[in-house]
Image (tube, coloured by chain):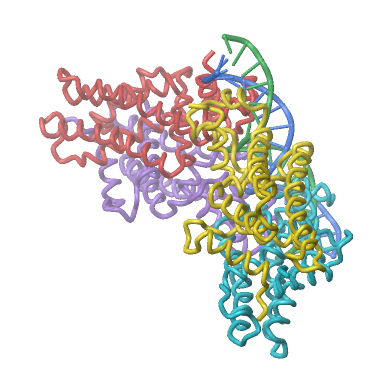
Chain colours: A yellow, B cyan, C red, D purple, E blue, F green
Amino acid sequence: MDVKKKIIEKSIELFEMKGFSETSIQDVVEALGVTKGTFYYYFDSKEQLLMNIHRMYIDELLNLQKQIIENRGMNQKTKLFETVKLLITQIKVTGRSARVFFREMMHLKPESAGIIKQKRKKFRLNIQTIIESGIKNGEFKPNLQADLVTFAVLGMCNWSYNWFDPEGPVADEELVKAYIDTLLNGIAN
Amino acid sequence: MDVKKKIIEKSIELFEMKGFSETSIQDVVEALGVTKGTFYYYFDSKEQLLMNIHRMYIDELLNLQKQIIENRGMNQKTKLFETVKLLITQIKVTGRSARVFFREMMHLKPESAGIIKQKRKKFRLNIQTIIESGIKNGEFKPNLQADLVTFAVLGMCNWSYNWFDPEGPVADEELVKAYIDTLLNGIAN
Amino acid sequence: MDVKKKIIEKSIELFEMKGFSETSIQDVVEALGVTKGTFYYYFDSKEQLLMNIHRMYIDELLNLQKQIIENRGMNQKTKLFETVKLLITQIKVTGRSARVFFREMMHLKPESAGIIKQKRKKFRLNIQTIIESGIKNGEFKPNLQADLVTFAVLGMCNWSYNWFDPEGPVADEELVKAYIDTLLNGIAN
Amino acid sequence: MDVKKKIIEKSIELFEMKGFSETSIQDVVEALGVTKGTFYYYFDSKEQLLMNIHRMYIDELLNLQKQIIENRGMNQKTKLFETVKLLITQIKVTGRSARVFFREMMHLKPESAGIIKQKRKKFRLNIQTIIESGIKNGEFKPNLQADLVTFAVLGMCNWSYNWFDPEGPVADEELVKAYIDTLLNGIAN
DNA sequence: CATGAATGAGGGTTCATTCAT
DNA sequence: CATGAATGAACCCTCATTCAT
């Protein structure tokens, strides 16, 4: 019913499958049985559509993150756990968007990219704050480099979109557990 | 002098800057002062050039990895350390290729992608073997899931190409140390 | 007005003059004052345009042939006469299409060629049936090889597109008369 | 051993299979394991090669025809028979050249085409002379139009290259007999 | 709101030909 | 005699975008 929403959803599907550059507006509208005119009624450009997808993804992520970091009842370890869980779950729930999000940012025009980068940075710094707070209150080791640890967490989790198949043999809870275990306790005996 | 080599190098530079799809053959040859005909004298297609870049990158990686895993004098912890160091160093040394390698694989045709995927899998399984050996001989914790840990290592390291700037404030040795520390000992106090 | 029709007509003209391979889409659209984009709005490919021309020609031929063979009032000699007349007249009426039709079939892709070949075969077998019926009812000699006679008729008539100029000194009725005379009565004294 | 001859033979093969325009010099030299330079050592251009093929074909035909028409011992009927036999046999013997000859003349440049056309005309007029002599001496019907009959003969025979397969179920002698029978005696009962 | 026709710039690729060696 | 590198023009086709209706 909502044509704009349908366009976005089908775009995500096609962008994820074939890539942004390889997907033409024609592909999108044909798959929906509408015409190019319709597309350009709802969107100014192909880039704007991509930006739309990016903004939705990162905003949702920031929103869910907010609920974690504003929760006064959680200690920092739990917050880290919830963060890892959030990232992995999001890949499960919106895998297609995730892949488009991580892969196609370069096709945004500089201004759009700037906005998204800022939001991604915010998301990252929020994690860094968790690490720093944990160091301060003794939950985490004292001499960690919070920024690098943060990148480690993000790399670990985000990379999953490259290989993790929620329908596959590994359950997402299992993955979260393995990651958080490695992160907190390390693998050395 | 060697035109083919020049084409490859310039391509890597442009693919990394603008992306594979956004870089035209025209862009490449113009930057080199040759003609499109010359390009097609050395390459059958744009895709073949990309495949060339991919193959060179992964083969170099596998080659360097071989030297690590075949070194009888190293224990598994050291091998893991060397692996992390290899991945990060490679980003420092051939950052452009790395970014092209991780970002543009989807533009390979299925057959080419298959070959590269197999090699990447081999690289991954070699790491997994290190983990498994370490578990067996007591260097690593007994109840780890070697496959997931391997993905964690790879994610952590490979993700770096997204943000790590070897010219920036963080030295590569520092990054390697922080990553291996997190991996081996964890961050929990 | 009808751009598609104009494209077809101009293509026939150019294909006939210069040959299919030697005529570029650019040639066609430039001659019409439209752009390449317009061409590809109406046709999927250059080959599809050629197929279009082929189909129109053979369908028209089959259609006209149908009126001959379904006419109960005609004996087989008359039907053969009408067939020869049809083929020659068609060269007069649509000489350009005829030349394109007979000359450029090899540029169709296999599937398209298959369809056209089948229709051409049908046209040929319809003639063969006339011959066979004529043999059976005594209009034609008893020991003819109907298939070879059919090829003789077709060769005689179709070859005309190579030299016959309806504007030239030989009238088409004259040609038809000469051909049918040769066919029916032979040239020996 | 004779490179030039090899080039010609392979060209005929490829031109016949794929068409003149669709066959590149690269195709030819690759199939022979030589280089483009070699080709251009022996031929000035692709067109010259095609002209070479055409000239060889028509000269051979004219040569063989000469032996027929200069044979004082033959009457005109026999000469016509031998002519039909010559054309059909030639398709059997040099089918590939025949198809290239009849199909690709349009790719000659005007001057070359002019030369070939003249030779083809000579061949045709030689046949016409047979007909006319036969009319004069009473072997053929008195009121034939020699020129149109000639075109009929040529069409009948030449068209065969479109369908006649010497390896197929119809023997060439059978075809010649059927054609000459139709020509001399007609098919009417 | 939505369409269908049209644009025009550019993309990857092919290829006959040239020429220094 | 023969090569291999290089050219440059052309070719088929794609596609984001525009716009009158």
Q: Residue furthest bottom?
A: B73
> Which residue is found at the position 35% from the left and 17% from the top?
C173
Q: Is residue B78 above or below residue D163?
A: below
- Seen in the picture, residue B83 relative to C115 is either above or below; the reply is below
B165 or A59: nearer the viewer? A59
Between C60 and A58, the one nearer to me in the picture:
A58
Residue D126 image-quadrant placement:
top left
User: Horizontally, is F3 left or right of A2 in the view?
Assistant: right
Q: Residue at x 68, y 83 (%)?
A: B76
- Counting labels gives 0
Residue at x-position 63% and y-position 57%: A84
- If the image is split into quadrants, where does the C terminus of chain B sit? bottom right
> Within the image, what quadrant is residue C154 found in?
top left
From the top left corner, tell me how far across and down residue A140 is, in percent: 74, 66
Quadrant position of the N terminus of chain B in the picture: bottom right
Residue at the farthest left position? C137
Left or right for D165, reference C43: left
Across and down, in percent, residue D43 comes to 67, 53
What residue do we see at 74% from left, 50% from top? A126
Horizontal side of residue A173 vs B180, given as left or right: left
Residue A158 location, x and y as percent?
65, 56
Give coordinates of residue C167: x percent, y percent.
48, 17
Answer yes or no: is residue B176 visible.
yes
C7 or C98: which is nearer to us? Answer: C7
- State which quadrant residue A53 falls in: top right
Which residue appears farthest toward the front when viewing the image? A73
Task: Judge whether residue D117 can be spotted in this image.
Answer: no
